Image (tube, rainbow, N blue to C red):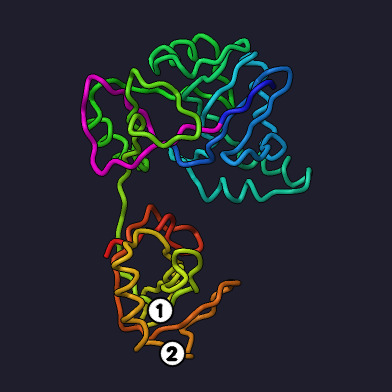
Amino acid sequence: MNRTYKPMLARLAHKPFSSSSWLFEIKWDGFRAIAYVIETVSVRSRNGKELIQVFPELEELKQLASNVVLDGEIVVVKDGKTDFQALLERSNATSQVEIELQKKRTPVVYIIFDILEKDGITLVNLPLTERKRILKASVKEGKHVLLSDFIETKGQAYYTIALEKGLEGIMAKKKDSFYEPGLRTGNWLKIKKLRSCDCVILGYTKGSGARTDTFGALLLGLYSEKKLVYVGKVGTGFSQRTLDMLSKRFQKLKTAKAPFFVNSADEITWLKPELVCEVAYQTVTKDKRLRLPRFSG
C-alpha cells in the first residue's frame, strides 16, 4: 500500500433539489471506510483504524477486485433498512469466537460508491462520472459487497422515495467533481430528514477551550408518565450569543438535586427543570437516547 486516503466529506443541505449537473444516491447509515484491495485487504475507518479483523467477511473483496482503493459504507441491513444500532453492537465484539458468532448472526455489507485508485494510479482528479464508470468495470458484487446505485437529475423525487422506504436521506454529488480527500466541500451534499422534540434542560457539563466560560453540553430529559427520563446530551448548534444567554439564565436555576443518575466522567451542574429547548435528532437508539442531537432553539 503506497499511499493512504482520507474520505471526502459532505456538507449538509437543508432541502432536496433536482439538477442535471448532479447525481443522487442513498445516504447509508453505517461506518465510512476506505478499502485497500492490493496484495491483501485492508479496510480503514475515517480515523485510520483497521476494521478487517472486526468484519472478516469483507475479505470477500479479494475475490471481487484487485489493485484498487475504494470508498464506501459498512452497514447492517435488516428488513430492507440499515440498522446502525446492530452495527454498533457488532463492532463491540472483541474475541475471535464472538466475532465469528456475530458474523453469522449479523453480517455486514460494504456498499461502495467511489474508486480512488486502480493499478497504482490515483483517480482522484478524474470527474465523478468517470470514476463511477471505472468502479463498475473494476469491482464485482458479492454476498457482502455491493455497488451503490444512483440516479441523475431527479433529486427531489429520489429523496421522497428514500424517506418512504424508511431511509435517512440521500447524497447529492456534482457529476464533474474531483475526489477531495479529507475536505468537506459543496461538491458533495447530504440531505437528511431530522426529527425534533422539546426537551427539558436538566443540567450541563463543564465547558473547555472556547467554552470555558459557558458550558460543554446540555443534559436533556423528557417526561414519561410524569417522571423525567434522561435522553442524552446535546453539544452542537449553539451560537456564541446563545451560549452566553443560556449560561446567564442557568445561574438562578442551579440545584444540588439530580433528577436521575448519569454515568458520566464529566463535571455536571444540575438545574431545576424549568427550561425547555427544541432539539433536532436523527433517530432514537434502543437505549432511548437521541442520536446525533443538535440544539435548535
Above-or-below relation of 234 to 181: below
Is the residue marked by circle 1 packed among few (<14), some (14-19), or many (20+) residues within 10 Å?
many
Which is nearer the eye, 19 or 284? 19
Residue 12 highlighted magenta (yes or no): yes
**Mark 2, residue position:** 255
Residue 260 vs residue 36, the one in the foreground? 36
Q: What residue type is labelled 2?
A: Thr
Q: CA–CA distance between discs 2 and 1?
A: 10 Å
Horizontal side of 279 relative to 137 (left or right) equals left
| SS class, disc 1 | strand
Q: Which residue lies furthest to the right in this view?
A: 96
Is residue 9 inside the magenta stretch?
Answer: yes
Depth check, front residue: 243 or 116: 243
The quadrant the N terminus occupies is: top right
* Rendered residue at 58%/11% (across/down): 121
What's the magenta region?
6-26
